[in-house]
Amino acid sequence: MPADNAAEMYLPHFVVKQKLTMMVNRYEVSESDEAGNPTRLMALAEQKRMALKEQVTFFSDASRSRPVFGFKARRRLDLNAGYDVTDEGGAQIGFFRKDFGASLLRSTFHVEGPGYAGSGQERSQFYGLLRRFTDLAFLPIHFDFLDTEGRPLFSVERKMSIGDRYRVTVPDQRVDFRVAAAVAVALDALMAR
């Protein structure tokens, strides 16, 4: 792929780790090696539980003094809500939304960014259905996002475990890491409902 089509902030691999607290979900986003071992902290985020309008801001460090990107729902309490992903200055760098109708059997999301559009779906319909009808929080979550021509954009994988740790692989250089990180956090936050 030509370098001029590469995203402003491209990372081929990173991990998202969730830390649970009483009122907020906290996420650490770290660059990683190919094996999924964190190598450099990229951002920290908090998501308020039970918010009427979903908004998550990612900060450069634990002091939360510098927001570096975020995502925000376009409307309140909308099952097909769209989310704008914005950079540090508030400019839109991407968009995603859950496809409620397609998600009845297998969760499906659509994603857009500069030079690409595509969708992602749970890899396993079995685990998707099992998650809907049981309260087993440790089930694996695997999403594969493909562009409109069927080429891989990125994937988000959580192994079967108690702690939420997602490994994100981004083979398409057009995908800004901030968009993929926002989608990975949203998958965790939105699938917990």
Image: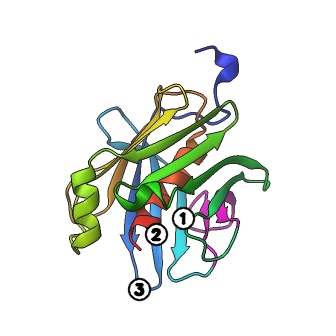
Gap in angstroms between the C-alphas marked 1 and 3? 15 Å
Q: Residue at x 50, y 80 (%)?
A: 49
* C-alpha gap between disc 2 and disc 1: 6 Å
The crowding category of the residue bearing disc 3, from other C-alpha atoms within 10 Å (few below 14, some 14 to 19, many at least 20), is few
Q: Which residue is mark 2?
A: 26
| Marks 2 and 3, how far apart at CA | 10 Å
The type of residue carrying mark 3 is: Met
The answer to whether mark 2 and mark 1 are in CB contact below 8 A is yes
Which residue position holds label 3?
Answer: 22
Q: Is residue 16 left or right of residue 124?
A: right
**Image x and y of residue 69, in percent:** 66, 55
- Range of residues picked out in magenta: 53-74
Q: Nearer the viewer, residue 63 or 151?
A: 151
Snapshot quadrant of residue 123: top left
Q: Is residue 190 visible in this depiction of the protein?
A: yes
Q: Secondary structure at mark 3?
A: loop
Under mark 2, the amino acid is Arg
Q: Is residue 147 magenta?
A: no
Q: Residue at x 79, y 51 (%)?
A: 91
The type of residue carrying mark 1 is: Ala
Circle 1 residue = 45
Looking at the rendered structure, the secondary structure element under dot 2 is strand
Badge 1 local density, few (<14 within 10 Å), some, or many (20+)?
many
Q: Position of residue 162 (x, y in %)?
A: 22, 66
Relative to the observer, which residue lies in front, 86 or 34?
A: 86
Between 74 and 69, the one nearer to me in the picture:
74
